[in-house]
Image (cartoon, rainbow, N blue to C red):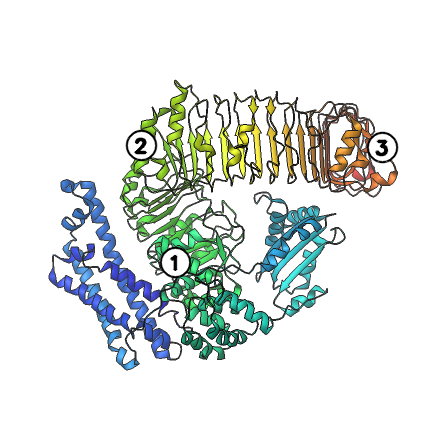
C-alpha cells in the first residue's frame, strides 16, 4: 500500500518550511544571535541538519508503508522537528515583543527594520535557557540523521517535477439538472433535497426540509415535535418531491416516524431515497432501483471527458486513449473513482506517466478505492498537506473557502492567500473537492468532499487531523494536532475537558452543523481549558454566545495566527489581544454588540486581514491606519470628520479595503477636488459600497453632483447603496453599462432629486430599491435607458418603490421590459400614483401594493404566475373590487396563487368562495368593512375549499359565518355584529377575539381542535360541550 504522505510527509514538509523561514540569513532570529558567535553557529548547525534530513524525506515517505522502521523514524522526526519549531516560535515571539516595545519607546525614531536590527537584545538568562534547549534539539536531530544510512534512505533524485496549471472541472450535474428541470418544477408544487448522511438526525432532517420548503427561520423552534407538525402542515395537500440523499439508517422505527410526516401529501407526491446499503432499500418496502456501476462505454466517456477533453490547446491524443481505456476499466464503473483519477491525469501528456498509473501495485489494495489512492499519491506535496488537513471536517459538511484557506495559512501549509485559492481550485479540478451549487460568493463559495474522499483524507492525515467525536482514548487526542468538534448547548466543558493535556494542539475548530448562533460556552472552558492549549495557531469561537473574554486568555495563546470571533455577542475585546504579535487573521464579522476595538491594536504588528463587516455599533478608530501589515480590511466604515477625524486622504491611502465599504457623513466633503482624494476608482476589491450623507441641505446642487461623480467606484462593484444624497440629479456613471457585476442598487432618501438615472441599461442588475425620493413626480421613459435597448431591465428580479409622496405617473414602455421580474412592491405611501403598471410581467411571482389609494392596475396585467398578492389600503389596485364580474375573472386567472392578502379596501363587497383557486393556502382579509361572503353554487364546493390559514379582521358586514371557508388555522377578530359562530370542520387552531356581541360558539361535527384562544368576547355564554376543558382567556 503506497498511501504514504501521512505522518512523515504532508505536515513535516510544512513544518520544515516554517523553520527555514525562521532561520533565514537576515531574519530577526539570526540578528539577535549575532552578539554571540557560538550561538550563531548553533543556528547554522540546526539549519544544516534539517537540510540533510529534508533531502531524504521524499524517499522515506514512499517507503514508510512497507517498512515499519522508516515509519517509526518519520514519527520520531516529526516530534523532533515539532520541538525545534516550538523553540523557534518561542524565540520569534520574544523578538516580536522586543520589536513592539522598541517601537513604543520610539528609539531614535527608526524604521521597523532598523529597530529589529539595532535594538533587539535578549537577556543573558534567556540566551542560556534557549541555548540549552537548542543543543538538546540538535542532538536529537543528529541522531536521526545518523540512522539514514542504516534505513537505506536515499537523497532526492532530482527528477523533474511537473509544474501544473490548475485545470478546470465541472462537477457532474446531470442529477441536479433533472431535479431542477422545468418539467419537474412545474409538476411538483414543492421540492426539497436533503443529504441525510451516516449520523441519522431526525431533528436536522426535519429542520433542513423546512428550510428548503419555506425559508424556515432557524430561531423559530427547537422542539422536534413542533417542527414535525410544521413540516406536516406544509406538505398537507401538496404534490411534493422529496429527495433524501445518502441514507444509512436501517432502523425501521426511525424511518416509520419520519415517513408519517409525508402521508398527507397530494396524489402524485414522490419520495426518492438514495443509499449505499441494501438493508436500507429493503426496509423502505417500496420499489428499489439498483443504480449499479457504469458500463465500460460510459466509464470511458466519463474518464475521457475529465482527462483528455477541454485541453488547451485542443488536441487529439490517440496514443493515450488505449491506455486510458484500460485505466477506466480498472475503476470498475465507479464514477467517483473515474473522475478523481482522470482529474489527476488531465495535465499529463507523456505516455510513461499514464502507463505508471496503469501498472501501479496499488490496484491490488483492498482498502480505500485504489483510484482514489492513486489520485492522492499523484498530488504534489503542497496539495497533499492541504488535502489531509481537511480531515477535520465531518462528512457532508459544507466548508467555506475563506475559512479553510486561512486555516492553511495559519498552520504554515500555505504562504499566501492567492496560493491557497489556487490549491483549493486544483483540488476541485481533481474531483477531490466539489463546489456546492449556488453557495454564497460572499465567502468565496462552499465546498464539500464525497464520503470516500473524506475517508481518504483521514488516512492521509494519519490521525493528526481528527474529529473529537471520533477520538478513541487519550493517546489519539495527544497525537492529534488539528481538531474539530460539533457545537452543543451544554456549555462544552465536559466535552472539551479531555483537551487539557493537548498542549501540542495547533488548530481548534468548533463546527455548528445546524448553523445555530448564541450557543453557550462555559466560563470554565475559557478560564481552565483553552489557556492550556499554548501551541494553538488557529482558534475559532464563532457562533458562541460569548459576551466577554478573560484578559489572561491571549497571554497564554500567544502563538495564535488565526482567531475567529465572528457572530459572537462580545462587546469589547480584552486589551491582552494586543500581545498576539503573530496574529495574521482576525474575524469580527456580525458581532452586533461590539462597540470598540482596543486602543493598542497597532501592536498586533503582523495583522494582515481584519473583517469587521456587519458590526453596526462599532466605530472604526483612526489608529487602524497604524496597522502597517494590514492588507485586507473587510467592512470598513469611514466616518468623515467627527471624533476620529477621518479624511478623504485616509481613504486614498487605504489600499487594503476589501468586501464592503461604508463612507458616512459625506456632507463634510467640500468639493470635487477633495472627493478626488479618495481615489475610489482604484479600489478594485471593494464589492459593496455604501455612500451616506446626513439630513441637511446643500448649498450648491452642482457641487453635490460633482462630489458624487468623483466617488464613482471600480467596475468590480456588486452592490451600491446611496443614502441622503443632496443633489438634484445623479451623475451619468450610475447608469453606465460597464458595471457588468452590479446586481443590487438602492437609492434612498435622496429628497432633492427630481429624476432617476437610466438604470434599465445596467445589464446584470437584479435588485433595485428606490425609496423616499420626495421630488420624483414621474418615472419617465429615460428610466429605461436608450431607446435602442430591446429589453430594459433584462436581468431585474426584484423592484421596490416606497414612500414617494409626489409620484404621480409611471410611464410604461410596453416593449418587454422587466422580463425576469419576480417581485414587485409599491409600498408604504405613494398617495398620488395613478395609471398603469408594466404589462406582460410573465415571471411575476409576488406583487405587493400598499397605501396607494389612487393606483388602478388596469387589465391586461399578467397575474397567472403570481403566487403571493398583497393589497393594503389601495382599493383600486390589482383587482377592480367594485366590479364583481371582473373581480371573479381575475381570481380565476390567478392559476398559481398561494397567498392572498387584502386590507383596507372599502370597495370590496363580495368574495366568491367558489372561485377561489385550489392552489390558495393563505387568505387574509383585514378592514374590509363592506365585505360579504357569497354562497357557493353547490354544497360540494365549499366542502372542497380548505385553506392552511384564514384571517378575517374587522369585516363587519359578514353576517353569515357559516359561509366562512374551512381552514386549519382560523383567526376571527373585531366582528362587532357577530352573535353566533360555527367553527368549521377541519379547524385545528382558532383565535377569536374582540367580538363583543358573540353569544354562541358551536363546533361542526368531526372537528378535532388542538388550540382555542378566546379574547374579550364578553357576552359569550358558554363553550361547546367538547371544548369545556380548553383554556379561555378574557
Q: Quadrant of residue 89?
A: bottom left
First of labels 2, 1 by sequence position: 1
Name the mark nearer the viewer: 2 or 3: 2
Name the foreground residue: 518 vs 365: 365
Q: Position of residue 168 (x, y in %)?
A: 46, 59
Decide: is 360 above or below 452: below
Residue 787 seen in the figure: yes
Residue 1013 seen in the figure: no
Q: Secondary structure at mark 3?
A: loop
Check disc 2 and report the residue beneath it.
Answer: 677
Residue at 56% across / 26% down in the picture?
Answer: 780
Q: Position of residue 197 (x, y in %)?
A: 57, 61
Mark 1 Cα shell of 10 Å, populated few (<14), some (14-19), many (≥20): some
Check disc 3 and report the residue beneath it.
Answer: 935
Decide: is 335 above or below 618: below
The single residue placed furthest to the front in the displayed view is 788
**Residues marked 2 and 3 touching at CB (< 8 Å):** no
Q: Quadrant of residue 878?
A: top right
Check disc 1 and report the residue beneath it.
Answer: 500
Tally of marks: 3
Rendered-image quadrant of the N terminus? bottom left
Amino acid at each position: 500500500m503506497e498511501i504514504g504522505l501521512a505522518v512523515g510527509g504532508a505536515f513535516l514538509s510544512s513544518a520544515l518550511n516554517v523553520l527555514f523561514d525562521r532561520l533565514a540569513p537576515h531574519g530577526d532570529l539570526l540578528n539577535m544571535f549575532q552578539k554571540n558567535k557560538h550561538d550563531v553557529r548553533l543556528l547554522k548547525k540546526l539549519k544544516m541538519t534539517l537540510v540533510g534530513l529534508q533531502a531524504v524525506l521524499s524517499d522515506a515517505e514512499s517507503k514508510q508503508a512497507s517498512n515499519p522502521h522508516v515509519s517509526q523514524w518519520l514519527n520520531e522526526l516529526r516530534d523532533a522537528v515539532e520541538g525545534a519549531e516550538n523553540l523557534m516560535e518561542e524565540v520569534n515571539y520574544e523578538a516580536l515583543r522586543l520589536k513592539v516595545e522598541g517601537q513604543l519607546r520610539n528609539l531614535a525614531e527608526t524604521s521597523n527594520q532598523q529597530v529589529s536590527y539595532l535594538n533587539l537584545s535578549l537577556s543573558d538568562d534567556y540566551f542560556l535557557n534557549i541555548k540549552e534547549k537548542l543543543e538538546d534539539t540538535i542532538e536529537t536531530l543528529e541522531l536521526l540523521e545518523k540512522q539514514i544510512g542504516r534505513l537505506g534512505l536515499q537523497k532526492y533524485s532530482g527528477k523533474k517535477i511537473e509544474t501544473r496549471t490548475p485545470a478546470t472541472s465541472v462537477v457532474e450535474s446531470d442529477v441536479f439538472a433533472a431535479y431542477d428541470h422545468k418539467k419537474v418544477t412545474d409538476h411538483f408544487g414543492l421540492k426539497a433535497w436533503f443529504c441525510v448522511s451516516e449520523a441519522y438526525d431526525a431533528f436536522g432532517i426535519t429542520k433542513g426540509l423546512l428550510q428548503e420548503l419555506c425559508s424556515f427561520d432557524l430561531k423559530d423552534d427547537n422542539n422536534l415535535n413542533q417542527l414535525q407538525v410544521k413540516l406536516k402542515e406544509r406538505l398537507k395537500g401538496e404534490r411534493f418531491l422529496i429527495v433524501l440523499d445518502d441514507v444509512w439508517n436501517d432502523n425501521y422505527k426511525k424511518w416509520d416516524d419520519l415517513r408519517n410526516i409525508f402521508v398527507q401529501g397530494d396524489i402524485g407526491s414522490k419520495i426518492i431515497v438514495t443509499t449505499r446499503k441494501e438493508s436500507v432499500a429493503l426496509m423502505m418496502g417500496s420499489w428499489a432501483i439498483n443504480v449499479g456501476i457504469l458500463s465500460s462505454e460510459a466509464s470511458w466517456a466519463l474518464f475521457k471527458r475529465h482527462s483528455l477533453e477541454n485541453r488547451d490547446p485542443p488536441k487529439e491524443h490517440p496514443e493515450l486513449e488505449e491506455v486510458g481505456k484500460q485505466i477506466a476499466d480498472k475503476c470498475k464503473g465507479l464514477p467517483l473513482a473515474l473522475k478523481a483519477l482522470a482529474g489527476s491525469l488531465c495535465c499529463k501528456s507523456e505516455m510513461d506517466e499514464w502507463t505508471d498509473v496503469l501498472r501501479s501495485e496499488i490496484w491490488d489494495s483492498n482498502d480505500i478505492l485504489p483510484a482514489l489512492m492513486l489520485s492522492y499519491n499523484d498530488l504534489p506535496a503542497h496539495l497533499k498537506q492541504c488535502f489531509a488537513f481537511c480531515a477535520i471536517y465531518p462528512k457532508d459538511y459544507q466548508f467555506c473557502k475563506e475559512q479553510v484557506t486561512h486555516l492553511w495559512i495559519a498552520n504554515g501549509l500555505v504562504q499566501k492567500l492567492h496560493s491557497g485559492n489556487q490549491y483549493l481550485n486544483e483540488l476541485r479540478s481533481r474531483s477531490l473537492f466539489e463546489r456546492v451549487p449556488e453557495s454564497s460568493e460572499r465567502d468565496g463559495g462552499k465546498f464539500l468532499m464525497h464520503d470516500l474522499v473524506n475517508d481518504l483524507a483521514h488516512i492521509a492525515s494519519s490521525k493528526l487531523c481528527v474529529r473529537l467525536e471520533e477520538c478513541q482514548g487519550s493517546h489519539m487526542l495527544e497525537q492529534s494536532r488539528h481538531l474539530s468538534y460539533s457545537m452543543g448547548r451544554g456549555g462544552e466543558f465536559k466535552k472539551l475537558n479531555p483537551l487539557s493535556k493537548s498542549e501540542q494542539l495547533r488548530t481548534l475548530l468548533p463546527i455548528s452543523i445546524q448553523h445555530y448562533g448564541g450557543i453557550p460556552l462555559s466560563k470554565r472552558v475559557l478560564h481552565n481549558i483553552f489557556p492550556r492549549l499554548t501551541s494553538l495557531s488557529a482558534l475559532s469561537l464563532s457562533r458562541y454566545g460569548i459576551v466577554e473574554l478573560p484578559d489572561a486568555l491571549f497571554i497564554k495563546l500567544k502563538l495564535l495566527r488565526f482567531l475567529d470571533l465572528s457572530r459572537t455577542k462580545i462587546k469589547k475585546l480584552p486589551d491582552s489581544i494586543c500581545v498576539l504579535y503573530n496574529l495574521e487573521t482576525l474575524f469580527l464579522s456580525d458581532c452586533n454588540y461590539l462597540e470598540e476595538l482596543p486602543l493598542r491594536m497597532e501592536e498586533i504588528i503582523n495583522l494582515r486581514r481584519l473583517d469587521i463587516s456587519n458590526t453596526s455599533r462599532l466605530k472604526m478608530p483612526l489608529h487602524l491606519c497604524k496597522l502597517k501589515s494590514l492588507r485586507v480590511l473587510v467592512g470598513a466604515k469611514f466616518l468623515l470628520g467627527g471624533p476620529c477625524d477621518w479624511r478623504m486622504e485616509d481613504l486614498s491611502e487605504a489600499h487594503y479595503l476589501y468586501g464592503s465599504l461604508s463612507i458616512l457623513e459625506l456632507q463634510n466633503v467640500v468639493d470635487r477636488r477633495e472627493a478626488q482624494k479618495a481615489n475610489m476608482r482604484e479600489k478594485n476589491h471593494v464589492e459593496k459600497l455604501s455612500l451616506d450623507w446626513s439630513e441637511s441641505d446643500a448649498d450648491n446642487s452642482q457641487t453635490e453632483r460633482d462630489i458624487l461623480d468623483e466617488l464613482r467606484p471600480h467596475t468590480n462593484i456588486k452592490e451600491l447603496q446611496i443614502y441622503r444624497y443632496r443633489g438634484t440629479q445623479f451623475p451619468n456613471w450610475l447608469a453606465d453599462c460597464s458595471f457588468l457585476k452590479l446586481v443590487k442598487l438602492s437609492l434612498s432618501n435622496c429628497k432633492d432629486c427630481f429624476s432617476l438615472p437610466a438604470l434599465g441599461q445596467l445589464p446584470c442588475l437584479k435588485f433595485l430599491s428606490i425609496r423616499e425620493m420626495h421630488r420624483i413626480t414621474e418615472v419617465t421613459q429615460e428610466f429605461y435607458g436608450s431607446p435602442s435597448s430591446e429589453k430594459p431591465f433584462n436581468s431585474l428580479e426584484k423592484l421596490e418603490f416606497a414612500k414617494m409622496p409626489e409620484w404621480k405617473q409611471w410611464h410604461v414602455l410596453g416593449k418587454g421590459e422587466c422580463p425576469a421580474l419576480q417581485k414587485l412592491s409599491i409600498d408604504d405611501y405613494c398617495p398620488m400614483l395613478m395609471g398603469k403598471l408594466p404589462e406582460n410581467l410573465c415571471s411575476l411571482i409576488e406583487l405587493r401594493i400598499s397605501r396607494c389609494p389612487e393606483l388602478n392596475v388596469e387589465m391586461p396585467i399578467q397575474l397567472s404566475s403570481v403566487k403571493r398578492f398583497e393589497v393594503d389600503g389601495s382599493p383600486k389596485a390589482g383587482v377592480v373590487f367594485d366590479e364583481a364580474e371582473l373581480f371573479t375573472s381575475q381570481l380565476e386567472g390567478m392559476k398559481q396563487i398561494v397567498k392572498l392578502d387584502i386590507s383596507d379596501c372599502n370597495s370590496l363587497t363580495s368574495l366568491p368562495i367558489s372561485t377561489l383557486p385550489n392552489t390558495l393556502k393563505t387568505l387574509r382579509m383585514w378592514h374590509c368593512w363592506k365585505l360579504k361572503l357569497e354562497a357557493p353554487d353547490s354544497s360540494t364546493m365549499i366542502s372542497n375549499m380548505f385553506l392552511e390559514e384564514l384571517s378575517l379582521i374587522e369585516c363587519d358586514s359578514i353576517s353569515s359565518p357559516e359561509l366562512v371557508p374551512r381552514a386549519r388555522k382560523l383567526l376571527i377578530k373585531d366582528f362587532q355584529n357577530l352573535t353566533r359562530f360555527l367553527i368549521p370542520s377541519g379547524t385545528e387552531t382558532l383565535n377569536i377575539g374582540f367580538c363583543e356581541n358573540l353569544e354562541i360558539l358551536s363546533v361542526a361535527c368531526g372537528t378535532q381542535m388542538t388550540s382555542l384562544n378566546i379574547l374579550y368576547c364578553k357576552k359569550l355564554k358558554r363553550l361547546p360541550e367538547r371544548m369545556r376543558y380548553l383554556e379561555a382567556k378574557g
